[in-house]
Image (tube, coloured by chain):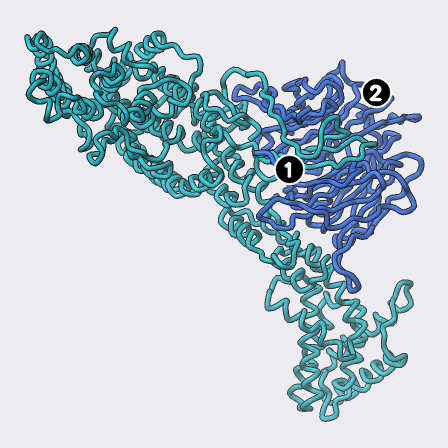
Chain colours: A blue, B cyan
Amino acid sequence: MDKSILVLDKGTRCTAWNYSGERLVAGLIDGSLAIYDSTDPASSNFTCTHRFKGLEAHNGSIVKVVWAPPEYGDAVACISEDGNLSLWEEIVDDTEGPHWKMCKCFDRNTSQVLDVQFGYGQTSLKLVAAYSDGRVKIHELLDTLELEKWQLQAEFQNVIDLVSKFGNVSCISASISWNPERIEVRQSSFVLGFNSNTPSLNSAKVWEFDLDHQRWLPVAELSLPEDKGDQVSSVAWAPNIGRPYELIAVATQKGISIWQLRSNPDHDGRLSVHRVALLSGHENEVWEMEWDMSGMTLATTGSDGVVRLWQSNLNGAWHEQAVLAPPS
Amino acid sequence: MPAVASDSGDFNSLSIVPHSLETQTPRVYPLRTSRTAPPFGRVSISWGRGSTLRVSLLQPGGAESDGEVVEVNLTNAEGGEISEAERQRIAHGSVTPFALLQSRKNQMDELQYDKTWWVHVMEYSNEIKSLLGTSKSYITPTIENPKALLEDVEEPTSLKAAWELMEMFYADKQSQTWIPERLLDWLADFDCLLSATLPTVHAKLVAFQKALVTIQEVENDPEYWEIMSSALGIGWLDIVVKMLRLHGSYQLDQLGTREIESGLVEAVAVLISQMPRLRPHISDEKLGECYNTKPEFMKAWEKWRTQITKLDCHPYWLQCDHKQTRVGLKNMIQIMLGNANVVSNATYHWIELYISHLLYIRPFTVGLESMYTLAQKCMHLKPITNRHKLMGLLIGILEENTEVVLAECSRSFGPWMITHAAELLTAGSAQAEILLHEEQSKIGGICIEELHRLIYAQVLSSHVLTWNIAPIYLTSCMKQGLGLLENLLYKQPVQVLSEVLKDCNILLHSIEICRLNGIDYVSHHMMKIAGVHYWKHGEKGSAVYWLQQAQDEVRLNRIAKHLFDFVGKSVSDESFKQWEGMIDLLGTESKTAGGLEFLKKYRDFRRSLQQVEDGITTDDARKASEALISLMRNPSTPQQFWLHLLNDSLELLNWKDRPLFNVSQTNLLLNKLQELSLARLLPGYVDADLPPDAFRSVRLALASNLGRAILEE
């Protein structure tokens, strides 16, 4: 059954649903954010309940919005077209009912923020941001109840060889996906890929926090030797409900690769990776990828304007299961 | 559904269930948009609960039109045959039988399992069947209206038809000896389903019944004879006999002139109603004579056949003037004698031909022996272009190919069917049991049975009215059920957005599910979300309550600090009462975090101090002084409160009757004061909001108390 559940305001550039699918935040071309709520939980009809202008100092469209994990409140991070990253949350105080206020605007120098993602289930909230100069910054929340106070935990470039440093890097886009595991049995980890002019930065790499040495280490590179420089448009880490391996989807211009990642590091600390499928479907760029809650079905969208659903059959062969195409 | 709801038997609706059949090209489903059209600036996706996908369709930058979000439910696989409400009713109704069967399975030992398991499975199957609709046969003659051949009953569903096939061939051990007759009954109930796309006996019968009202002399209508032959061919004896009695020669005014004709009709009718049937019993309105064992049946069959042959050769036929009657009855006799050509002409669908073969040509068929070859032969004789999904399932069963049966179940009838029918399948076939229970490394180490349960649970969790039964199926999944249950619960809404709709049902229900499954960390996570939501939304009391439930010490300590700041400012005035209520709310929870524990002790201290001011008895004062010592000893008492506490206790320190603090206690307090005076020198120390001479007054009081204490000791 498909039905239209929400009409977005004119000029919407990006949207994001919260953890329970009961709220949507939309970023608009004029730099505003709009919040849509369900008026009645039984029906799924949503209306705009809040609309507010983003950063006054910086004009330009909002290009990306992301919800913070719900245990930190109703908060979103948003990136504006000029590359600023700010954090907004809904609060009630003595003077006013529920309203949205900016709680943090992250400093930036010359480079722009391209993508941002919150980590799950750690004792302290982590926010990883990828910048147009190929750097990654990981910010850590200092106070669980105040989204204002952050400190920079780490900063590095997306390269396997930790010694190399690249200058004159220009990235068009970046994609980050955290390991969705919530239980703190494993170290927090995420996968990151770039679309840039510097081949070594591009390929998707899995970063894991090494508790003993208190630093982030690249533990796997999700790319075949001949494809290492391929520009990555999107990455998605699948939920794991009990598989002995992790599944990560990586999209490049060659198609969507499904990678298996096993947690048995070799003597260099690298995890074994194995590409189980290379899927082609979207003619050009892949825009977004998202796994369902069981990690069995991958949904993707791309510049061909359709949604594709991918699944493995019982023999382990991945294939395109369905296409959702808007009427042309 | 985006899919075209046809009943053509192939996988035609949007369901994302993996199976092992060859990969087909992906199906394209048109998304129904109401306001937007391509090209899009961006198409954004987000999985909602379960198997719902939300697609944001955003217009390109310059466009002046709206964007929209379309929600797609990827769960419907019955081709639109069953309504949403009906599906939910079935989903809820099948929980108890399923859960009961699982618990019986867990309790049973192996020996019992082999012998009696199918009895439990049949009990389960009967309960499920009753959910899928009434089991009343479609073909029931009514006495009231002689011209009503078929009774109007509720339209059966393919789902029920499929369930009965599975039951008949796998679960019901008692029916193994009379499968052909069971199949005949099945066709009587569900032939109408096949009529939708192809000509069938049922369809012809329905059409004829409509025309019957206007037909005067029915025996002159060739269709009358054709339809009777068809009905006889597939064993609908009661209908045939009823139709025969409509013959004109039965009418009172005709009896004299058409005696022989009427005699022949009656003779055929009697023979039909005496047809031997290899089945233990038959319902009252159905005709035929039942035989339980094959030898008895064979004997009766031979006798019956002899009678037919005898009638066939009778000289009366020459005297019968009515040609249609003569030809028609002779044709029916040929059917009963098993003439393959006549049988083939009388039937339409291959399954009908199949039934006639089993009835009249191979009446002694028992079990599944060579049934598949016969089916192939019938399909060859009656080729069909548009295969019904039920036929796909039936062929898989006859072929004894478990993989095909599984695939047909899941792709044509959906996750509900495969999850529940797997129990029938495993009860009846050792091969199926191995196939369903074998761990598959290619799908992450689970077995196919578990895979289907997981998918079904995901489908259930797509809907707000069925998500709460998903855990029952997930707990029957040994390997990945808990993982999916966690993810399902993490997606449950916790905070309440509207004041009007404030209730915590979903939260409370989720907490209960967590408790039953031993996943308290998930409920703690949910309670944390609730606590933080309340905190941010100005409901501090509820916030503290939920964070306490979540045992979230980090956040509680943080809140305690926040309260200290507040308390610290107003300690000596009347606003004490404002936050006293909040501390009361903390109740008697023993596991409160350090900071909050201090607040409770502080509250108690304040109360006893209050009593001292009111009553002035030494006993009260002693209690208050004990509370003070305990507070000052407690490491969780924040330094910023020390001076407040001491200043508030000046009256106790200067107690007139006798010193309330002994030497060591006074020394403790003096040390604290000393520590405080050193801390005051450090940067970042916030001076308490107290009179400037408070420090001095306390020191003085302590010194004099120490002096008096030494003297006393």
> How many neighbours does mark 1 have within 10 angstroms: few (below 14), some (14-19), or many (20 or more)?
many
Residue depicted at 79% across the width and 40% down the height: A27
Secondary-structure class at tag 1: strand
Which picture quadrant has residue B249?
Answer: top left
Q: Position of residue B148 (x, y in %)?
A: 25, 30
Quadrant of the rendering where the N terminus of chain B is positioned: top right
Q: Closest to the observer: B289 or B553?
A: B289
B328 relative position to B532: left or right = left
Is the residue at mark 2 from the same chain as the one at mark 1?
Answer: yes
Task: Name the image quarter holding residue B95.
Answer: top left
Residue A242 at x, y percent in the picture: 56, 33
The answer to whether residue B435 is above or below residue A2 is above
In this rendering, would B656 be left or right of B31? Answer: right
Say which of B312 and B446 sits in front: B312
- The answer to whether A274 is drawn above or below residue B85 in the figure is above
> CA gap, disc 2 to disc 1?
42 Å
How far from the left and from the top, in percent, is residue B598?
Answer: 70, 68
Element type where label 2 sits in the image: helix
Q: Which residue is mark 1?
A: A4
Q: Residue B650: x, y in percent?
A: 78, 84
Mark 2 or 1: in front is 1
Query: Subunit of mark 2?
Result: A
Nearer-the-camera pick, A263 or A315: A315
- Chain letter of disc 1? A
Q: Residue at x 43, y 27 (%)?
A: B437
Q: In the image, what residue type sits under mark 1?
A: Ser
Instruction: List the single residue furthest toward the bottom.
Output: B657
**Mark 2 nearby-residue class (10 Å; few <14, some 14–19, many ≥20):** some
Which tag, 2 or 1, sits closer to the chain's start? 1
Q: Which disc is residue A199 wearing?
A: 2
Total number of numbered discs in the rendering: 2
